[in-house]
Image (tube, coloured by chain):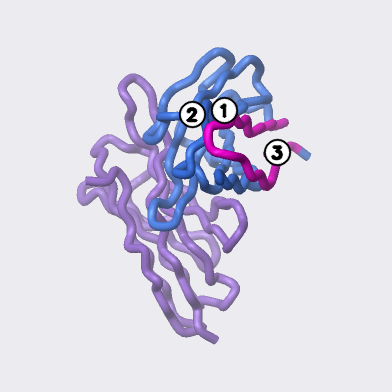
Chain colours: A purple, B blue
Amino acid sequence: QKEVEQNSGPLSVPEGAIASLNCTYSDRVSQSFFWYRQYSGKSPELIMSIYSNGDKEDGRFTAQLNKASQYVSLLIRDSQPSDSATYLCAVNIRDGATNKLIFGTGTLLAVQP
Amino acid sequence: DAEITQSPRHKITETGRQVTLACHQTWNHNNMFWYRQDLGHGLRLIHYSYGVHDTNKGEVSDGYSVSRSNTEDLPLTLESAASSQTSVYFCASSESRGDTEAFFGQGTRLTVV
């Protein structure tokens, strides 16, 4: 089982719709979760971080965390063509006495005008 | 402004040659990471460092080495380049070990022929 898993997509949504991106992780004691956006040919950039169970909202973005189910999601409301990118889920995973930041394979989102 | 820079941006090398990719950050972050990104695999952790003289192996460390002689730099060395190491390499740094944002460099596209 991969430590962080995402559906690779592509996820296609019409402009103005809600895009829902999902991620599961294997380490039950992980405490830090991140969503990065990566445009083609560019480096990843952070869009959301979440550390506690529940929802965290930032503008059109909402991150949802359920530690019992080892599940984190990202909702994008009023999707725009400019949101078309690959969305990477990242989780802080235990590595013996230390931690490492592990990424999922990413979900490609395509917002259709 | 603080930043993280990688060099070169593009490199073509021959099988068997030693190659070093540079990463320099001015954030004064203790934590630095090297990832490779390939289609279908997402970002995979190669090596990481939590401070000067500290290095740790990631998921795909075979054939790679790093050294950390100062806070600003974490060069990645491919001891004997192989075609399987053709990839896009990203360096990142963060303020803490797992609960804050990681900032990424622009990436280095390496082709081994």
Residue that badge 3 annotates: B7
Residue A55: x and y in percent read 38, 57
* First in residue order: circle 3 vs circle 1: 3
**Residue shown at 39%/37% (left/top)?**
A92
Residue type at mark 2 is: Tyr
Q: In this view, does B72 lie to the left or right of B64?
A: right
Q: Give the range drawn in magenta.
A: B2-26
As drawn, the label of residue B77 is 1
Q: Which class describes the residues within 10 Å of circle 2: few (<14), some (14-19), or many (20+)?
A: some
Chain of the residue that carries numbered disc 3 in the rendered image = B
Residue at image position (65%, 20%) is B71
Q: Please tell me how crowded label 1 is: few (under 14), some (14-19), or many (20+) other residues with Cα within 10 Å.
A: some
The residue type indicated by label 3 comes to: Ser
| Vertical position of residue B1 compared to residue B97: above or below | below
Mark 2 — residue? B64
Give neighbour class at mark 3: few <14, some 14-19, many 20+ (Cα, 10 Å): some
Residues tagged 2 and 1 counted as in contact (Cβ below 8 A): yes
